[in-house]
Image (cartoon, grey):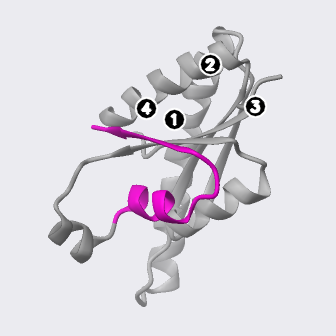
């Protein structure tokens, strides 16, 4: 029995996220694990008009559905089991909740290697996941 049965692949659909998916694809093929390809629509923590936010959220979700469908097709073509999901909320907190709710064994996430000052000022999803995750995290420097 494999120690890794569920891999979370957090993606923001950037070109750099492709590198993360390359690692995830190889790991899933080696372990026969299910891949959970997940994108979090970051909801703002500041006031915005509901009309503006609703329109923006719908556009972001539409883009995410298209991108996740492409990822799903690529993984299925390689006979890898895959689940896709679009989540809403603060990316770090939302990913950590997903990990707990879905029995994730390994999280794969990209990091840009920002300085401590940049991370302090702007935050880092990868850092939040690394600090709060109860399962192993593969952080891939992009």
The residue drawn where x is 54% and y is 16% is 26
**Mark closest to the chain's N terminus, 3 or 2:** 3
Name the residue carrying label 3. Answer: 5
**Quarter of the image with the C terminus in it:** top left
Crowding near pointer 4: few (<14 within 10 Å), some, many (20+)? many
Return the mark for residue 20. 4
**Mark closest to the chain's N terminus, 4 or 3:** 3
| Residue 127 x, y percent position in the rendering | 39, 60
Placement of 73 over or under 110, stated as above or below: above
Q: Nearer the viewer, mark 4 or mark 2?
A: 4
**Mark closest to the chain's N terminus, 1 or 3:** 3
Hey, which quadrant is residue 40 in on the image? bottom right
Crowding near pointer 3: few (<14 within 10 Å), some, many (20+)? some
User: Label 1 to label 3, Cα distance in Å?
Assistant: 24 Å
Q: Are marks 3 and 2 in contact (CB under 8 Å)?
A: no
Q: Secondary structure at mark 3?
A: loop
The residue drawn where x is 19% and y is 67% is 116
Magenta span of residues: 124-142
| Residue 2 x, y percent position in the rendering | 76, 24
Query: Does the stretch in magenta take in 66?
Result: no
Q: Nearer the viewer, mark 4 or mark 3?
A: 3
Q: Nearer the viewer, mark 1 or mark 2?
A: 2
Hey, which quadrant is residue 15 in on the image? top left
| Residue 115 x, y percent position in the rendering | 16, 61
Name the residue carrying label 1. Answer: 67
Left or right: where 134 falls relative to 48:
right
Q: Nearer the viewer, mark 4 or mark 1?
A: 4
Name the residue carrying label 2. Answer: 75
């Amino acid at each position: 029995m494999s120690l890794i049965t569920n891999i979370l692949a957090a993606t923001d659909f950037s070109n750099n996220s492709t590198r993360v998916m390359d690692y995830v694809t190889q790991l899933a093929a080696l372990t026969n694990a299910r891949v959970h390809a997940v994108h979090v629509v970051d909801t703002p923590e500041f006031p915005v008009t509901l009309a503006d936010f609703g329109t923006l959220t719908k556009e972001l979700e539409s883009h995410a559905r298209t991108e996740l469908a492409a990822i799903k097709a690529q993984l299925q073509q390689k006979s890898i089991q895959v689940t896709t999901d679009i989540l809403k909320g603060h990316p770090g907190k939302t990913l950590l909740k997903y990990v707990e709710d879905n029995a994730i064994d390994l999280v794969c996430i990209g990091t840009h290697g920002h300085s401590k000052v940049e991370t302090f000022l702007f935050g880092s999803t990868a850092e939040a996941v690394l600090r709060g995750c109860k399962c192993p995290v593969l952080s891939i420097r992009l």
